[in-house]
Image: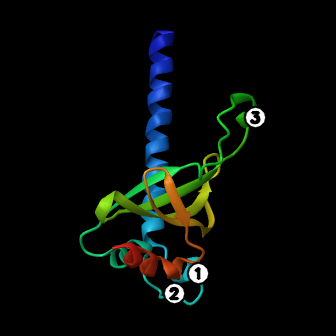
Amino acid sequence: MKTSAIVGLFVFTLAAQQLALEKRAIELARKVPVSKLEPGLPKQALARWLTQAAGPAAKITWEVNDCGEQSGNPETDRGRDFPMCVDGIANLAGDRKAIVSVVMGTFQKGVTGPPRLWSVSVGKDNRFDPVSKLRDLPARIQAVN
């Protein structure tokens, strides 16, 4: 087998492993009871809770990212194990979005430890306002509608 074929297979394998990790993180984040993210909330899965909070017209998408922790400088970021956030993104009326970010582990260690709330925000374009408590998100969504 040629070296380029081996390198290609290795890159493909790493990409497939990364996709599997992201799929697993999303699957688990969607099932996290919101009561585990914020005491006093119901023992309801995050996916269901977010759908109810956003309303029936909202489309919810899910993605994995580094929680905004990369600096963009390869020298600074080299060797760092970035947190792995799963974002539940509710696409609302008026091009607004509500985003709930949950840390599910790190990119090097994978899905580890208990999930924890990273951030909650509502906004449009590149202007998002933080929501201090997850329980306040439904009211913040409704306040602008």
Nearest to the observer: residue 78 or residue 9: 78
Residue on which disc 3 sits: 76
Determine which of the numbered discs, if any, sits on residue 41 in the image: 2
Mark nearer the N terminus (2 vs 3): 2
Q: Secondary structure at mark 2?
A: loop
Task: Name the residue rendered at 44%, 81% in the picture.
Answer: 139
Label 1 sits on residue: 38
Residue type at tag 2: Leu
Is 43 situated above or below 96? below
| Spot occupied by residue 27 in the image (x, y as percentages of width and height) | 42, 62
- Residue at (24% x, 70% y) in the render: 57
Residue 104 left/right relative to 71: left
Q: Do residues under tags 2 and 1 come within 8 Å of each other at their CB atoms?
A: yes
Question: Is residue 33 visible from the viewing direction of this image?
Answer: no
Amino acid type indicated by mark 1: Glu
Residue pictured at 43% horizontal, 51% vertical: 125
Quadrant (top left/top right/bottom left/bottom right) for the C terminus:
bottom left
Q: Is residue 22 left or right of residue 78?
A: left
Question: Does the image show residue 139?
Answer: yes
